[in-house]
Amino acid sequence: MNSPILEYLASYGIDPAYIIIGLLAVVFILLILYIMVVCKMRKLFRIYNRFMKGKDMESMEDVIMSQFDRMETLEQSVEENTGNIKKMEENLQKAYQKVGLVKYDAFREMSGSLSYSFALLDRKDNGVVISSMYSREGCYSYAKEIIHGESAINLSEEEKEALKKAINVDKIQD
């Protein structure tokens, strides 16, 4: 092998066998990389073929358009649900949310705390206090309107306590 390149390398003390071994190692590494790329391409082609199987461009367009229609329907549904939730939140502001109950003996002759005062209030402390007094002669019930936590009619001590419990329900829960 009389090659001017090999002679030139030999003049600098470089053995041509090292260069050949180095080139073989590079070729081997490139071969491994090529095999990895081919495997990934096959996998990609399998996925692509499965996706496109039985579909032509017109049917793919129909599938895509139907997906857009579904998305629009879902967006409308979300907007409608959001509106419904807002209405429910507004209605909940007017619903009775706070409760206070006090049981007591209205008359000394009775025992067992059969009489009670019951306060029902909404978020703004509007509602009613219902009192029922039980005696041997009968049962007497009263309802008093509450506006912003106050009553226009004088409240008994038990009714005041029930009202106070109902107003403070939020403070207890927090």
Image (cartoon, grey):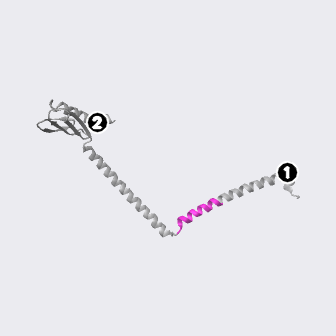
Magenta stretch bounds:
38-53
- Give the residue at x 38% y 59%: 73
Label 1 sits on a secondary structure element that is: loop
Label 2 sits on a secondary structure element that is: helix
Magenta region includes residue 32: no
C-alpha separation, residue under disc 1 versus residue under disc 2: 93 Å
Q: Position of residue 101 (x, y in %)?
A: 23, 36
Q: Position of residue 152 (x, y in %)?
A: 15, 35
Image-based side of 21 in relation to 81, left or right: right
Q: Is residue 173 above or below residue 76?
A: above
Which disc is residue 169 wearing? 2
The image quadrant of residue 5 is: bottom right
Magenta region includes residue 43: yes
- Of 136 and 39, nearer the camera is 136
Q: Is residue 21 above or below residue 66?
A: above
Q: Position of residue 1 (x, y in %)?
A: 88, 59
Q: Please, what is the three-letter code of the amino acid marked with disc 1? A: Asp
Which disc is residue 153 wearing? none
The residue identified by callout 1 is: 15
> In what quadrant of the picture does the C terminus appear?
top left
